[in-house]
Image: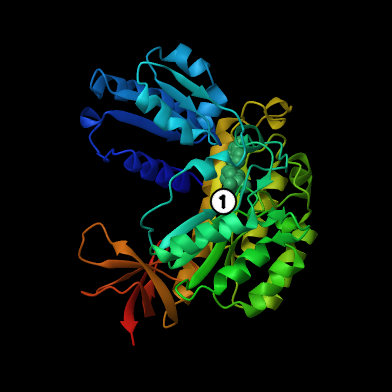
Amino acid sequence: MNVYDGLRIAAMLEHHGLESTDNVADADIILLNTCAVRAKATDKVYSALGRIRRAKKPDAIYGIVGCVARESGADAFRKIRDLNFVLGPQSYHKLPEIIKNPDSKLLDIDLGGLEKFDELPPITKSPFVAYIPVQEGCNHCCTYCIVPFTRGREISRPYNDILAETMHAAAVGAIEICFIGQNVNGYKYTDENGKTYRLSDLIKQTAKIDSVKRIRFTSSYPTEMTDDLIELFKTESKLLPFLNMPIQSGSNNILQKMNRQYNLDEYITIINKFKIARPDIQISSDFIVGFPGETNTDFEQTVDIAKQIKYINSYSFKYSPRPHTAAAIMQNQIPENIKSERLIKLDAVLNDIQREFNLSCQDKVFDCLYEGADKTGTKQIYRTPYMQPCIVETDNPTPMARIKITSGNKSCLHGKIVD
Ligand code: SAH
């Protein structure tokens, strides 16, 4: 979501005649797009603003956009007096106002909903992967999560607007469409004739676009995996066999305290339905360790479920208390050193599973999407249908290629293009 917002902001500023630069000292306008999900990212914002303040031209304007802006509000101006703008994740389309009037201060952290999508100029060129937001906000009040506060309650975008943005992205270069939303599979839009559209309808329609070769979506809430969506994995070959479906914890006791609306059995039932629909499907997850009250036994259950499901790729975090959330004021907060120990243990298990899956890909042939050159500039990186980076040597990288995997390790694969 932040990548998408960043691209739209860059495109909007270019539309207003600005050019991008990596050098703060050259810039006329500097903004930080910020994340508030964990304290660490938020804490970095103010030190980064201090560095920008010292390095920038005296008359350059600067500010923050995104979730930390929404969280801080006017407080940001009290902390840094000469800051020019503070715009929440649904107000960044107002940036041109401050460009026109650089001596003013601009504060807007309203949760206006979908207004920004109508205001932003269309993109003129798309990377091969286009992120298309289908909804904003989240109605699942997970007790650890700040998102319902920073991005607001769930609103689904009009079906036709999403399809128009998707077709436009394809027309200007997208080959893979990734539908995004805080609760992407909760997408539900009823038009003026009373017809209701779900994520499965968006996928079916998108699959009809010839130049779109791959479709995926993130981030999903387990119990919103409706049968229409699961069934689509049987028939729609453009849907990648790879799904992010965060479990967060392997303990029913902790899941309940997190206010996740499923228990382990229910979660496993959903995974089994996917496996029936698409036997080669693989799952990735997010995990939180050290949630308030998490015992050693709870934690061991998380390790067990990771081994059982064999998530091929995961994001794991130490629980971070956030403002406006119920868990932040729960009893039995877990000491930092225990959180760290548990994270190291879980990561070791997750890494082993990932390595094992990558090794199992050897000799397989995948249709892969080109991403770009590697750091050395001499080799090319493609993405497999499981989103693994695959390094190949070729002088002539095509947007899609059939690649035979020759080797793999924890973090990537190596392969050869076959005809
Ligand atoms: N559904 C959202 C979730 C965003 S946060 C989306 O992807 O758009 C991504 C992950 O961060 C969550 O799945 C969760 O594992 C983790 N997370 C959220 N709040 C957290 C907190 N307070 N402490 C640690 N990790 C957190």
Instruction: Pick whichever, 356 or 288, lies toward us.
Output: 288
Q: Name the residue under label 1.
A: 346
In the picture provided, is 295 more to the left or to the right than 126?
A: right
In the picture provided, is 224 more to the left or to the right than 105?
A: right
Amino acid carrying mark 1 in the image:
Leu
Image quadrant for the C terminus? bottom left
Instruction: Pick whichever, 369 or 358, lies toward us.
Output: 369
| The image quadrant in which ligand 1 is located | top right
Quadrant assignment, res 334: top right
Q: Where is residue 300 in the image (x, y as percent from the top left)?
A: 67, 51
Quadrant assignment, res 256: top right
Instruction: Pick whichever, 25 or 41, lies toward us.
Output: 25
**Residue at horizontal 72 percent and vertical 47 percent from the top:** 297
Taking the view exactly as shown, the residue that stands out farthest to the front is 193
Query: Few, some or many C-alpha atoms within 10 Å of disc 1 (few <14, some 14-19, many ≥20)?
Result: many
Q: Position of residue 235 (x, y in %)?
A: 64, 80
**Residue at horizontal 40 percent and vertical 70 percent from the top:** 369
Q: Where is residue 183 in the image (x, y as percent from the top left)?
A: 65, 50
Q: Where is residue 278 in the image (x, y as percent from the top left)?
A: 64, 77
The correct choice, above or below, for 295 with respect to 215 in the image is above
In the picture provided, is 345 more to the left or to the right than 262?
A: left
Q: Is residue 48 visible?
A: no
The correct choice, above or below, for 182 with respect to 380 in the image is above
**Residue at horizontal 55 percent and vertical 33 percent from the top:** 337
In the picture provided, is 218 more to the left or to the right than 124?
A: right
